[in-house]
């Protein structure tokens, strides 16, 4: 609850007010308000939501090792653009949270790639004002490299646009296949409670999206449709004048995502590292809402926007190709043990290493792929 305008309002109150005024809303609208309402949304009301005290873990929470290896990939990207005449390198991190990944990357570049570090201009793009406010402190050792901390993508980027677990946090439409064809799950209200209802698809692009992914849903099956993720890819591709788009997220190619394995869909609410017990409709604004990314749709959106796909692999292959194994040291000192545990967490089959996928796209980057995605596969 917060004092908002002239009344004490919660996210639930705002949703109910909107539904009473305009009728049932889509799950995408529900998520937009629950996660991103400027004063009350889940992400708006805290600078950091992941980690032990939070609701979920990302690779960044495992420690600086992830950022160190991403830095190796960024150093190679800088070399590629430098060979093509670049004199500066934009590092744009989208969905940057309070800036911890950017800090880990810059720490590693400053230590091992001074040339890249000196040419780098960092822009942090983050929707949450609370998270943006924390970034300058997180990055206090790298202030000279920061050119922006903003809510929207910059207009022209020559370097890399990077995002870790951004796409899975973007609003999705939820559909179901019925005897009468494709229907959209909508959110209505009954006696002051939020309830699920159904209607025709709210947007013709929903059916187009499923058709171009080759998705055929069984009767009764539910599926998410990530139009916002495709719009974001389009915006990122338009912003990318030359360089790379490097995305880390969990998800599947469309045939797997829309198979009976995911019959009930993948939308889930995370509270204190536990998915779903209370359901994603309960107490909006108090939980992370997330769904698996449709990798096929992301690739199609990137290619339609003129980018070249450089590789899509399990994160384990990316990290190993960039030297994860070489960074594991022997020894009984606590910091060394901690690093070994971090490496194991990042690599563990069934854990972050295989659930997380790395997608790399490029524009005007010359021939050849990138070290991190040149080999490996998707599981
Ligand atoms: C799951 S969190 C990941 C945070 C961080 N990248 C990490 O790995 O720990 C998703 C972040 O993306 C931000 N976000 C969501 N939509 C965004 C958008 N369109 N542009 C920029 N940031 C956005 C959220 O506010 C949140 O901080």
Image (spheres, rainbow, N blue to C red):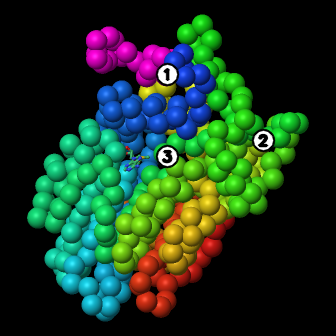
Q: Give the range drawn in magenta.
A: 1-18
- Mark 1 surroundings within 10 Å by alpha-carbon count, few (fewer than 14), some (14 through 19), many (20 or more): some
Q: In this rendering, would 69 be left or right of 253?
A: left
Answer yes or no: do the residues labelled 3 and 1 have beta carbons within 8 Å?
A: no
According to the picture, the residue beneath numbered tag 1 turns out to be 18
Q: Foreground: 138 or 23?
A: 23
Q: Is residue 108 above or below residue 227?
A: below
Q: Mark 3 points at which residue?
A: 170
Question: Could you give the CA–CA distance between mark 3 and mark 1, rounded to whole angstroms?
Answer: 20 Å
Under tag 2, what secondary structure? strand
Image quadrant where one finds the N terminus: top left
Tag 2 or tag 3, which sits nearer the N-term? 3
Of 159 and 315, which appears nearest the observer? 159
Instruction: Give the residue at x 36% y 75%.
Output: 241
Mark 3 sits near ligand 1, with its Cβ under 8 Å away: yes
Image location of residue 308, percent across then percent down: 52, 78
């Amino acid at each position: 609850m917060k004092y908002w305008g002239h009344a004490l309002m919660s996210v639930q109150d705002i949703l109910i007010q909107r539904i009473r005024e305009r009728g049932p809303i889509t799950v995408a609208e529900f998520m937009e308000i629950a996660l991103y309402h400027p004063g009350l949304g889940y992400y708006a009301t805290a600078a950091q939501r992941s980690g032990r005290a939070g609701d979920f873990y990302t690779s960044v929470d495992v420690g600086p090792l992830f950022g160190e290896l991403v830095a190796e990939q960024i150093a190679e990207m800088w070399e590629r653009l430098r060979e093509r005449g670049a004199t500066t390198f934009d590092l744009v991190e989208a969905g940057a949270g309070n800036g911890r990944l950017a800090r880990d990357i810059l720490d590693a570049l400053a230590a091992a790639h001074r040339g890249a570090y000196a040419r780098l201009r960092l822009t942090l793009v983050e929707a949450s004002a609370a998270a943006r406010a924390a970034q300058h402190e997180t990055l206090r050792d790298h202030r000279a490299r920061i050119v922006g901390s903003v809510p929207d993508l910059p207009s022209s980027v020559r370097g890399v646009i990077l995002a870790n677990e951004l796409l899975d946090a973007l609003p999705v439409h939820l559909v179901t296949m019925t005897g009468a064809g494709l229907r959209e799950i909508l959110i209505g209200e009954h006696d002051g409670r939020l309830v699920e209802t159904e209607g025709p698809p709210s947007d013709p692009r929903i059916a187009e999206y499923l058709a171009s992914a080759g998705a055929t849903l069984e009767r009764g099956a539910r599926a998410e449709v990530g139009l916002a993720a495709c719009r974001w890819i389009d915006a990122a591709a338009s912003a990318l004048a030359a360089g790379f788009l490097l995305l880390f997220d969990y998800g599947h190619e469309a045939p797997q995502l829309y198979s009976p394995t995911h019959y009930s869909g993948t939308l889930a609410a995370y509270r204190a590292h536990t998915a779903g017990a209370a359901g994603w409709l309960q107490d909006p604004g108090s939980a992370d809402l997330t769904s698996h990314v449709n990798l096929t749709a992301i690739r199609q959106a990137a290619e339609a926007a003129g980018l070249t796909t450089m590789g899509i692999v399990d994160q384990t292959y990316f990290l190993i190709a960039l030297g994860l194994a070489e960074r594991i040291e022997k020894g009984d000192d606590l910091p060394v043990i901690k690093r070994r545990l971090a490496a194991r967490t990042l690599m563990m089959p069934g854990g972050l290493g295989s659930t997380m996928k790395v997608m790399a796209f490029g524009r005007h980057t010359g021939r050849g792929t990138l070290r991190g995605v040149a080999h490996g596969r998707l599981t």
